[in-house]
Amino acid sequence: MNKRSFGFLIAFVMFGYFTKAQDYFADRNNAGTPIFLSKNGSKNYLFSAGVNTADATAIKINLYKQNWGSPKFGIDTNHTTLGSSGWGVFANASTKGGVGKLFKSGNFDPGFSGGVYYALTEVHMWKDGLGRLHSKYHAWIFNGNIGFANNQLYDPSAVFANQLSTKKFTSPALGVSYVYAPSLAKDDLFVGGSVSWKKKSNYDDLDTYNIVNDSLITANGITRKVTKINPSGDTYAVGAYKEFSTFQLRANLSYIPAALDYRFGVIIYPSVEFGGPTSARINTGIAFNYLQDGNPTLSVFTINFELNDINNAAASTKTFLKRAFKVGISTNLNFVTGR
């Protein structure tokens, strides 16, 4: 039985319905919208929970519900089209203080986001004159979400009492994704793309510092330095803070080789981002996934390598690797009901 898929792309096996799921266009921050195809679509839910480490460690939860339509036949029973729809909700909490900070304080600072999405999928199957079975697959996913963050800023030119401030930031986003598999009879190869709009800030481009408040106590000619109990301080960004809207065009290529028993997959996702205070940014990324046995569309472990703003549109003075190269690692637990 061939079950296959990976990263942000999904597959359907021509000899029946098997559980399929996928984090579409997943990146190092685990930003994706997982959907699946199953035998009992009206009874199935997918629940997934993941933890990832990038610049900000994050926890993500997701719930998706699948619904199937009735099969549609072509000129004869050798031509069949199967369609489905589904809806999902998700929430993502992140903090530069690490996952432990979330559990200890319940504080989602500096970021929390949540959203909804809707998916339409279709598989077309047919037999040729020699009785060989063929199929092709495509899917559309529409999503919207809103995020909240507390961006902490440090202005050394201000008077001391006003140097540290917190900027509350709201970031709505809308997007549409498409994926196409010209043939599901061979190793899984998928191509796709997405278009998205999002309100963003340049907070991640600014230099950051740990700020610790100290005090000096003088007695009998002796000066004693007293440090705040929090020894690591809080993270603040320095520079001209800005908020703006961006549009991103993203291409995607995914491959899951049969020779590896559909347990490993690789995805390449170049993109161009327009808008904001800089010229267009050119980005690219590659992700390697270890896939769940028996449900190879579900990723158990992922490592992402990215090069962001390759052309240095932000005019950063940092070295290329320090400003552009990013690595993210994520692990996921996935549960499917009604199988």
Image (cartoon, rainbow, N blue to C red):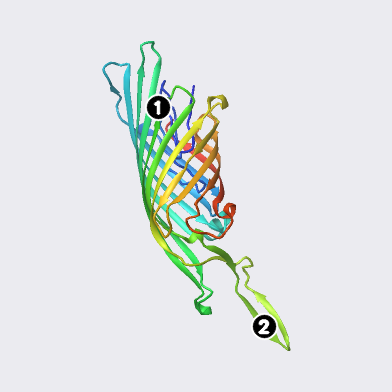
**What residue type is disc 2 on?**
Ile
Q: Is residue 264 left or right of residue 191?
A: right
Who's the residue at 32% across and 21% down the image?
80
Picture quadrant of residue 220: bottom right
Which one is earlier in the sequence, the residue at label 2 or at label 1?
1
Q: Position of residue 70 (x, y in %)?
A: 29, 27
Secondary element under disc 2, as helix, strand or loop, is strand
Which mark identifies residue 182? 1
Which mark identifies residue 319? none
Closer-to-camera residue (109/277): 277
Q: Position of residue 278 (x, y in %)?
A: 43, 58
Who's the residue at 44% across and 67% down the image?
167
Relative to residue 170, is residue 255 depicted above or below?
above
Picture quadrant of residue 292: top right
Q: Quadrant of the C terminus?
A: top left
Closer-to-camera residue (33/209): 209
Who's the residue at 48% across and 71% down the image?
165
Which mark identifies residue 217? 2
Q: Position of residue 25 (x, y in %)?
A: 45, 42
Task: Give the mark count.
Answer: 2
Q: Position of residue 140 (x, y in %)?
A: 35, 37
Residue 109 visible (yes or no):
no
